[in-house]
Image (cartoon, rainbow, N blue to C red):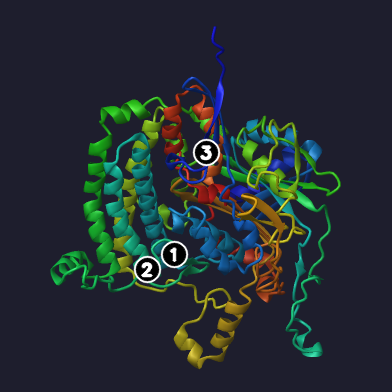
Amino acid sequence: MDKSTQLAEQCQQRFAAELHAVKVQHGEVTLEVGRKDLLTVATALRDETPFKFDALMDVCGVDYLDYGKSEWVGDDATSTGFERGVMRERKLQAHEFTGPRFAVVYHLLSIALNQRIRVKVRLEEADLLVDSVVEIWPSANWFEREAFDFYGILFKGHPDLRRILTDYGFIGHPFRKDFPLSGYVEVRYDATQQRVVYEPVDIEPRVLVPKVIRDDSRYRHPDIQEGATDAGDP
Amino acid sequence: MPEIRNYTINFGPQHPAAHGVLRLVLELDGETVKAADPHIGLLHRATEKLAETKPFNQSIGYMDRLDYVSMMCNEHGYVLAIEKLLGVSAPKRAQYIRVMFDEITRILNHLLWVGAHALDIGAMTVFLYAFRERETLLDCYEAVSGSRMHATYYRPGGVYRDLPVQMPQYQASKWHSEREVHKLNENRQGSLLDFIEDFTRIFPGCVDEYETLLTDNRIWKQRTVDIGVVSPERAIALGFSGPMLRGSGVEWDLRKKQPYEVYGDLDFKIPVGVNGDCYDRYLVRMEEMRQSNDIIKQCVQWLRANPGPVMLPDHKVTPPTRVDMKEDMEALIHHFKLFTEGYCVPEGEAYAAVEHPKGEFGVYLVSDGANKPYRLKVRAPGFSHLAALGEMCDGHLLADVVAILSSQDIVFGEIDR
């Protein structure tokens, strides 16, 4: 039994009540917990012996709004002719995805025991609130500010939840999938007013290479793939 | 009684010692720093969001522009994440080339760092010395990728092409006579590997030169010893990695602890500090340059003895050769599909981390089975280092802020992303 499966089993035993799912993929363990249990699970992961995750390496938000939606499906090319144009408005559901729209993903590292784990908390769009882990790992501070800035996820108990990477006075949460890549405003220096002015963007959003999801036969049997060597795997 | 109160000043966003576009709001009590609040994001380019709109391979070039002084290491993290999701790994020779260029990049990064750090503290000469060696290494970048900085050389499944057998040479011009050019070309007579080997012979002497200028220098020690001390426990809690963590005395290096590529087969040592101050971080990085030099030597030896492919022959991921395309229809179709649509990556998520010159550079990739990343998150080492700046500066003098900031090896390309 390799290290990651062993870790997954230890988690399963310890957090039987709290865990929604445990997954091992590419030698990485992913725990999915409900947000009410996040702090208890996080504290246990930091302090208890088989885990000892003393460092939080990363926190990030994920928006699953467009998950599994492709901009161009070419499978029916023979029956209806080759589809050349790409409709920007239309997105095709290539495979089913259900579940809350947002997630916060924590990447933990144990320097003492040399292992990694990923903890995921799913959040509904209507209620984007999750407990802050700043008290457990101080390094979460800026990462949570970033997730708030990009996705609008609120962290309860965060000492200083300000925007971090976007402009002063920025409106909206730019990494959400419904936020256009070109944004809403652009800035320029206005010589007559002698100051920088904000104007609506005049860029037409466009797709250069449409997103396609291919049902690739090589990946149909995940159990066979799992045996292949994982590059850079510890 | 005059009224005495603290005052707040802006350090940056345009300041030569701010290492780019940092706006630091400092609250001062006389010359003592009471609080430091870094405002970042002035160089934010939404690299991660841009990557979500492009096929996987088209974002490799963006990775160079994250930490723009250690270009190939950024590419490495991204490429490893893709390879992990695809379930492929590069041929042995490509892995050695990657490791060799990772270490060349580490030296490039540390040279720029030592130059800029010394310049911030007031030593001008080191900067000039360091750029002399950087020039040689950037020539290696150019020889292998055609570009001196933004190489886009690593690809999922290998590296773009094999090392050149002839090192490019200088040509005589109206600025350089035949005689000058002849002298410049002396170490460029053979292949790139000969050129790099020649560099590894002279480089330890160069590091000695920098150390002569700094290590026992009284002013240097006054400015760095006991400045910005971080305890090992605190360094771990703050999410430090790389030389910042090792400077505090934690033995942690991904190249040793979680070896990727061929680091497991190579012989090198990990320098660790004792006090966790700016001086120890300086010593750690100086020793790392010597160790990197040794790794490069070992790679050159191996690469000389073992010719072979540098790309996987799996043409669903890597392009076929030009020759094949002329004769083989399959190859032509593969080429067309790869360069128009790209390749689809199986559904899943992966986190790949490399020991970047600045610390742990992690790439978290979520794929929904499409030809573009669904979500890309770059875990930049400098981000958590800069987050701790306020804590590290607390109680120090204004002049020490500059020393602490530059000892963190801050580059805004990766922090603002």
Provide residue B394's location: percent of width, then percent of height: 52, 25
Q: Chain of mark 3?
A: B
Q: Which residue is identified by label 2?
A: B144
Q: Mark 2 packing: few (<14 Cα in 10 Å), some, or many (20+)?
A: many
Q: Find the distance from the CA under tag 1 to the CA under tag 3.
A: 26 Å
Residue type highlighted by circle 2: Val
Residue extending furthest toward the bottom: B327
Q: Which mark is residue B151?
A: 1
Q: Chain of mark 1?
A: B
User: Quadrant of residue B376 in the image?
Assistant: bottom right
Left or right of B48 in this view: B228:
left
User: In the rendered image, is residue A17 in sight?
Assistant: no
A202 displayed left or right of B142: right
Picture layout, residue A7 above or below residue A69: above
CB under 8 Å between discs 1 and 2: yes
Residue behind mark 3: B385
Circle 3: residue type: His
Residue sitting at x 40%, y 32%:
B278
Q: Earlier in the sequence, mark 1 or mark 3?
A: 1
Which residue appears at 38% of the width and 73% of the height? B308
